[in-house]
């Protein structure tokens, strides 16, 4: 596992650059996911524009205005926040005892760094405005195509996606939330994909209606991009070991921290008993006899520890079916010998690497959607297929994941399973309604 870029560079090239610790691998892949998604959305929108399915909209803008106080305040604020945090984190990275993840989400930072970047952004904005300044500002009518608005759509998806993901995660883990609301709201961990999808979709739909853009054509353009972006995001989960793994695979055990071998049911039960405090209390005793709380995945008895037994074919690597996520970013598990510093833990028992499965499934579903987009002419059909695909994918992956459950008519579904069923149902209804109109 590579919790941040520092560990990746150290492993690949044998070079230690402490400043790279501020670049967490999950965040890097999320950024890549947004960039790739934007590229595919723009490409598909341009294709639809050439077909005459999406048209530009004329808007009146004022050009030639000098730098305003609002420009100064906005650029100064953005520059100060990023400078305050980035330069501060860069300087703090030289201190081995600093937890940079906690640092980034704290009030600490570099005032000098904030002032420097604020001044730089204000200057760049002034230079841009000065080049365009006219003796008398004038109004002009410009044509804005849908693909020109991809940047706005991505920003809306980012803001409302994060807000929705945090909202649904805290609703799903209400007991944890009420214990410390502030910490859970501003914690960098704990994001629910469907919460982000739902809130971002609502925000983008409102924006499209205001801008006079056909919602169904836009939704069809976004659907394949959402699928590939999700797959790339899951790469970040897998590489960093952020906790989005599955239940334990009882066909294997970890005979040493980070190492996996095949095992019998008796051997699996023996391992559960050896690490009973981890499975029942979320705590472990480290080599120096200190007690550490390392996980919130706890069972009320060893018999209820969630697991399934599946032995993979011998010609395939064991980590495809059972993995202990050594050096995971959550610092979950037992300490690994001869490992110093942070991120030196591995799960005491191997789990199904569900993030890896989702990478493969969603990557494949993206290819299907991308191939279908030119063959389907009815607006809304691609969106309907996407809803069914994403619902089915998540519903079945939940069968080997551990999440909070609800009790409904004697059933115990997870939040994701409930939403998945609604997405499948919504996709099926949209598909039937759109097919009837053709």
Image (cartoon, rainbow, N blue to C red):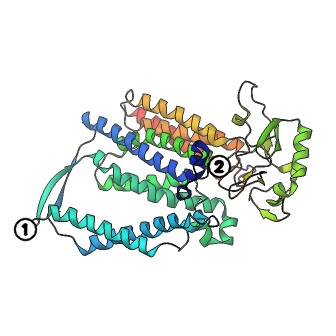
Residue 388 disc label: none
Q: Earlier in the sequence, mark 1 or mark 2?
A: 1
Left or right placement of residue 350 versus residue 387 in this view:
right
Say which mark, if any, is on residue 135.
Answer: 1
Position in image of residue 308 (x %, y %)? 79, 39
Rendering quarter of residue 434: top left
- Name, please, the residue furthest toward the front: 15
Q: Which mark is residue 241?
A: 2
Residue at x-position 47% and y-position 64% = 86
Task: Give x and y (percent) for residue 258.
Answer: 76, 44
Residue at image location 36% in from the left, 46% down from the top: 215
179 sits left or right of 278 in the view: left
- In percent of width and height, residue 345 lies at 74, 53
Q: Please say if 432 is above or below 208.
A: above
The quarter of the image holding the C terminus is top left
Is residue 110 rendered to the left or right of residue 392? left
Q: Where is 169 relative to 258, above or below?
A: below
Side of 286 where 411 appears, left or right: left
């Amino acid at each position: 596992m590579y919790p941040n870029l520092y560990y990746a560079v150290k492993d690949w090239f044998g070079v230690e650059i402490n400043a790279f610790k501020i670049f967490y691998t999950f965040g890097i892949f999320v950024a890549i996911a947004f960039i790739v998604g934007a590229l595919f959305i723009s490409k598909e929108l341009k294709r639809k524009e050439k077909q005459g399915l999406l048209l530009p909209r004329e808007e009146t803008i004022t050009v030639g205005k000098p730098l305003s106080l609002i420009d100064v305040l906005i650029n100064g604020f953005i520059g100060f926040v990023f400078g305050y945090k980035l330069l501060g984190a860069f300087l703090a990275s030289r201190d081995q005892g600093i937890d940079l993840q906690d640092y980034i989400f704290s009030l600490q930072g570099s005032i000098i760094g904030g002032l420097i970047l604020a001044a730089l952004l204000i200057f760049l904005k002034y230079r841009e405005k000065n080049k365009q300044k006219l003796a008398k500002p004038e109004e002009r009518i410009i044509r804005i195509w849908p693909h020109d608005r991809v940047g706005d759509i991505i920003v809306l998806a980012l803001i409302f996606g994060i807000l929705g993901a945090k909202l649904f995660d805290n609703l799903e883990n209400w007991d944890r939330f009420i214990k410390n609301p502030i910490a859970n709201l501003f914690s960098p961990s704990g994001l629910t994909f469907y919460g982000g999808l739902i809130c971002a979709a609502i925000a983008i739909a409102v924006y499209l209606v205001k801008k006079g853009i056909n919602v169904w054509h836009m939704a069809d353009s976004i659907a394949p991009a959402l699928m590939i972006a999700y797959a790339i995001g899951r790469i970040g989960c897998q590489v960093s070991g952020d906790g989005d793994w599955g239940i334990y695979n009882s066909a294997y055990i970890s005979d040493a921290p980070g190492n996996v071998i095949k095992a019998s049911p008796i051997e699996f039960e023996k391992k559960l008993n050896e690490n009973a405090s981890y499975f029942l209390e979320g705590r472990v005793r480290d080599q120096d006899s200190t007690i550490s709380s390392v996980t919130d995945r706890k069972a009320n008895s060893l018999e209820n520890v969630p697991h399934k037994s599946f032995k993979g074919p011998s010609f395939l690597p064991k980590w495809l079916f059972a993995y202990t996520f050594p050096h995971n970013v959550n610092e979950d598990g037992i300490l690994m010998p001869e490992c110093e510093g942070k991120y030196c833990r591995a799960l005491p028992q191997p789990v199904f690497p569900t993030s890896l499965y989702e990478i493969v499934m969603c990557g494949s579903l993206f290819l299907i959607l991308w191939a279908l987009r030119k063959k389907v002419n009815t607006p809304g059909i691609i969106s309907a297929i996407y809803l069914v695909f994403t619902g089915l994918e998540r519903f079945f992956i939940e069968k080997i994941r551990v999440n909070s459950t609800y009790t409904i008519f004697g059933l115990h579904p997870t939040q994701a399973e409930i939403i998945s069923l609604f997405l499948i149902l919504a996709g099926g209804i949209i598909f039937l309604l759109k097919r009837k109109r053709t």
